[in-house]
Image (tube, rainbow, N blue to C red):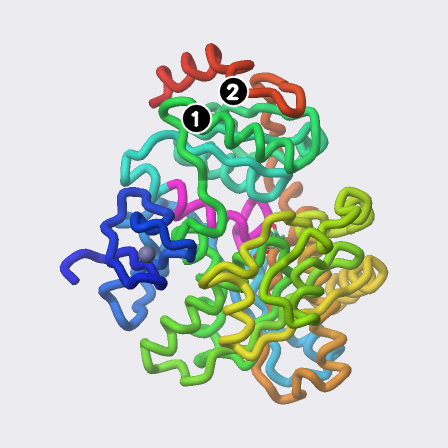
Amino acid sequence: MNQKYLLRCPSCGMYIPDRYTNTCPAGCPGLIRAEYAARCITPHLFPGIFRYADWLPVVGTLPTHAGPLTYRSEGLAREAGLANLWICFNGYWPEKRALIRTCSFKELEAWPTMLRLQEKGAGIMQVSSAGNTGRAFAEVSAQCSYPLVLSVPVRGLDRIWTTRPAEQVFLVAVEGDYTDAITFGNALCTLPGLVPEGGAKNPARRDGMGTVLLDGTLTCGRLPDWYVQAVGSGTGGIAAWEMAERLRGDGRWGERLPRLLLSQNIPFTPMADAWRDGRRDLTPADFEDAKLRIAEVWADVLTNRKPPYGIPGGLREALLATNGVMDAVTNAEAHAAARLFEEAEGCDLDPAAAVATASLLRSAEEGIIGPDETVLLNITGGGYQRVKEDYTLRRVRPACTVAAGAGAASVEEQMVEWVKDHA
Ligand SMILES: *Cc1c(COP(=O)(O)O)cnc(C)c1O
Ligand SMILES: [Zn+2]
């Protein structure tokens, strides 16, 4: 390979040069992956995620301190009775040198995804989000002056803030829920110049998230026995599996893939239910009364309605390949875990990270995780209290508001003008 990376379809095996390609040109249904010329990982001296640029599907780098930060736990490890617990903290905690200002691991996805689009000159990024993803992309846009179109449900607007003025963000508020915002976002992408972010299909997104396992493995010196994360789409779990395969190929970090321990929040647990029942895919029954159940979940970033579970290279395959486990915890268990983490480690958590912590504690107590096994806990978000001490958080203001079910025509004129100014 004389290029840094090529894309490859795991179904038909075709090598695909990257033109911001997120699906196999032959029409295969699975997730295409990046294959890198570097078989062994060599960390660079950059401070943030681009430390791992050799295994990100981009050519250059961006100047950022945001990246995964792994340290050995003492407090939580004692509470859990685990001798080898490592925490990858993805949020804002400068005392530990964790510097993700928007406080979630969605920034690990946003940095390489925005850079990849910029390098390929494919157009302007469009992202639909109810919270963490939109904030992460808005922050990258604000720091790099890359244009961005965001589609956000009205109720999610107060979660879209940045630490610098977001002058290149065109934010559309959608009167409706997350699904309505996605529908409108897809309609927007029929306008010329706008490119959808691509979700789990985007290899830059997955390899960005995969840097959690990469940082964890390089910090503890080996592939861990367990990788623990709360999931909504499952993309982080798929990413960890793919990165584990790469690290096994590197040859210096061990032969055995970490077992995935993935967690969802009761009462909305479609993937945990399908895995428990041994089903090949999700069914409409998994989404019965979804609206009501989603309304009861504390960690609402985990309530994805279209997770890539049964597709080739999807979450089910990741669980099968790693002898994985799925768990589900209640709001009360997650709240208790959040309090315990704050006391034992000293930082506030995103509710989703509290769900993962609750599953870790239970699995250790029940002996599913052995006391001497090496465990990597992905704290997917935290530090919302701490970041306010260092930065003024600026709400991004909507450029316009549309009704649920509106078509792109409702904003077309305004959008075409804006695209002309920013392309
Ligand atoms: C998106 C998100 C998750 C779930 O991640 P997936 O791997 O996409 O399922 C977990 N925690 C936080 C804080 C998130 O923002
Ligand atoms: Zn193919």
Residue at screen point 76% across, 77% down: 79
Q: Is residue 105 magenta?
A: yes
Image quadrant in which the C terminus is located = top left
Q: Position of residue 88 (x, y in %)?
A: 56, 65
For the residue carrying disc 1, how many other residues have a C-alpha within 10 Å: few (<14), some (14-19), or many (20+)? few
Q: Residue furthest right?
A: 332
Image location (x, y in percent) of residue 249: 33, 77
Residue placed at 72% from the left, 78% from the top? 363
x, y (%) of residue 246?
36, 71
Give the structural element (helix, strand or loop) at label 2. helix
Q: CA distance from mark 2 to mark 1?
A: 8 Å
| Quadrant of the drawing holding the N terminus | bottom left
Q: Secondary structure at mark 1?
A: loop
Ligand 1 placement by image quarter = bottom right
Q: In the figure, is residue 222 to the left or right of 278?
A: left
Write down the quadrant of residue 347 in the picture: bottom right
Mark toward the start of the polypeptide (2 vs 1):
1
Image disc number at residue 190: 1
Residue 175: percent from the left, percent from the top? 69, 24
**What amino acid does circle 1 point to?**
Thr
Q: In this view of the protein, can residue 48 be seen by the observer?
A: no
Q: Amino acid at mark 2?
A: Ala
Question: Does the magenta-highlighted stretch encompass residue 269?
Answer: no
**In the rendered structure, which segment of residues is drawn in magenta?**
98-114
Residue name at image x 35 percent, y 16 percent: 420
Q: Identify the residue shown where x is 59% and y is 77%.
A: 375
Q: Quadrant of residue 98?
A: bottom right
The reply to whether residue 142 is in sight is yes
Mark 2 lies on residue: 408
Left-right relation of 199 to 76: left
Q: Determine the residue located farthest toward the left in the rendered image.
A: 2
